[in-house]
């Protein structure tokens, strides 16, 4: 790591420092809005093959850094490599998203192999090793996993859905079985994040992309408690681990997430009012977010106003600039350039 005098901008903010210009990266910053990604993507038979080919995953991780010089690179992979490594059948239909053999019965669950470090993810760790050697010295390296509820919701439904209804119904009807699945994912995710950190990522983000669909009791049981358990397990092994949590759509429950022990930053989704968040989230916890991906896609004055609102709300606290959810494939490159120029303009 760089000596303290030259600690990376992103890490300074995660360690609680307020900086005059916030570090910036974008969720899903590698991907289809980049022509250079589309070009290499077409060389792999399937999306999972792409993720498990270190040369390709390394290149996809580095592409947005080369083009834009973001302050952080995020490992190119997917949250669904966990079910894949557990032994569930996972595939991606081009243009339509993931398809998994759904978990329906106790027997389906019993067939999974809870040992996540069984070799299946070795190519991911090899990618981390390769990227680490090629990142510019000022760029921070982020690893990630999906939160147990979010990953479980795909494991039960077998695909993306508008509101994760299949997993919600399953959890109401079979709470004990669902709790077993969540417990398995807590263990697997903690082991996976520790292994990523040991391989060379400097920060991990836990994506709870579907935390916003649950009522409060279920939110506490299936989102908050499992993520708390992961954070505690990772920190028990690696006390200095830096961990960002992103509870998308959690609305005011976001505060419960933000108060959990051991987080380094909280990711805010598009709908969170930055002024409200600046007042509610303890100043000691850095915040990350939360420009509307559609404002970035649209460009123009709407984009400029959105950027200014966020910069001004978080101007006096540690802040990492990001979107409130992933960048959309139709986003013009010029708008990303404009965003960077505005965020990084001299104060
Ligand atoms: O066609 C393609 O190239 C595949 C599209 C794609 C990409 C580029 C998928 C399929 N996954 C990814 C990469 C990815 N996914 C990254 C790494 C790159 C980066 O951020 O730059 C990350 C962090 C993810 C995480 C991910 N996958 C999440 C959590 C974040 C979020 O956006 O909410 C989720 C929910 C997934 C599942 C998934 N994988 C892919 C798709 C299309 C989906 C969504 C499925 C759905 O709900 O319909």
Image: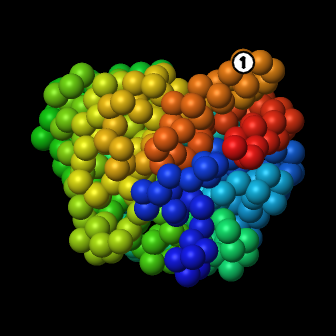
Name the outermost residue toward the front. Answer: 347
The residue positioned 23% from the left and 54% from the top of the image is 261
Q: Is residue 295 left or right of residue 175?
A: right
What residue is rendered at 32% in x and 31% in y? 280
Image location (x, y in percent) of residue 254: 33, 33
Of all residues, the one furthest to the top in this rendering is 302
Which quadrant does the N terminus fall into? Answer: bottom right
**Callout 1: SS:** helix
195 relative to 3, above or below:
above
Give the residue displayed 20% in from the left and 35% down from the top: 220
**Residue 90's spot in the image, x, y percent?**
51, 49
63 left or right of 78 in image: right
The spot of residue 115 in percent (x, y) is 32, 69
The C terminus, quarter of image = top right
Residue 307: x percent and y percent?
66, 30
Residue at far left of view: 176
Given residues 41 and 131, the one toward you in this image is 131
Task: Choose between 95 and 304: the one closer to the eye.
Answer: 304
- Residue 118 in the image: above or below residue 333: below
Q: Is residue 332 above or below residue 283?
A: above
Q: Is residue 262 left or right of residue 16?
A: left
* Residue beneath disc 1: 302
Q: Is residue 138 visible?
A: yes
Left of 66 or right of it: where is 206?
left
Q: Residue at x 57, y 71 (%)?
A: 7
């Amino acid at each position: 790591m760089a000596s303290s005098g030259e600690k990376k901008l992103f890490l300074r903010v995660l360690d609680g420092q307020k900086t005059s210009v916030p570090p910036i990266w974008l969720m899903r910053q590698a991907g289809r809005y980049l022509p250079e990604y589309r070009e290499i993507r077409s060389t792999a038979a399937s999306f999972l093959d792409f993720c498990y080919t270190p040369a390709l995953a390394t290149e996809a991780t580095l592409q947005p850094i080369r083009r834009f010089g973001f302050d952080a690179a995020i490992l190119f992979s997917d949250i669904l490599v966990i079910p894949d490594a557990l032994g569930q059948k996972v595939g991606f239909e081009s243009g339509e998203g993931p398809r998994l053999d759904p978990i329906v019965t106790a027997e389906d669950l019993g067939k999974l192999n809870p040992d996540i470090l069984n070799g299946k993810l070795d190519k991911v760790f090899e990618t981390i090793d390769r990227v680490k050697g090629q990142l510019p010295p000022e760029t921070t390296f982020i690893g990630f996993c999906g939160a147990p509820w979010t990953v479980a919701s795909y494991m039960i439904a077998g695909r993306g859905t508008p509101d994760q209804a299949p997993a919600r119904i399953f959890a109401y009807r079979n709470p004990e079985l669902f709790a077993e699945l969540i417990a398995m994912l807590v263990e697997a995710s903690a082991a996976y994040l520790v292994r990523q950190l040991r391989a060379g990522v400097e920060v991990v983000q836990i994506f709870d992309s579907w935390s916003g669909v649950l009522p409060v009791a279920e939110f506490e049981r299936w989102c908050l408690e499992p993520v708390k358990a992961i954070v505690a397990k990772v920190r028990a092994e690696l006390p200095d681990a830096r961990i960002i949590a992103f509870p998308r759509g959690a609305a005011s429950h976001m505060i419960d997430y933000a108060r959990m022990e051991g987080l380094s930053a909280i990711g805010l989704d598009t709908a969170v009012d930055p002024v409200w968040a600046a007042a509610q989230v303890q100043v000691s916890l850095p915040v990350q977010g939360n420009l509307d991906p559609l404002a970035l896609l649209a460009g123009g004055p709407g984009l400029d106003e959105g950027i200014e609102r966020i910069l001004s709300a978080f101007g006096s606290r540690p802040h990492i600039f990001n979107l409130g959810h992933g960048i959309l494939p139709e986003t013009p490159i010029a708008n990303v350039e404009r965003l960077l120029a505005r965020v990084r303009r001299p104060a």
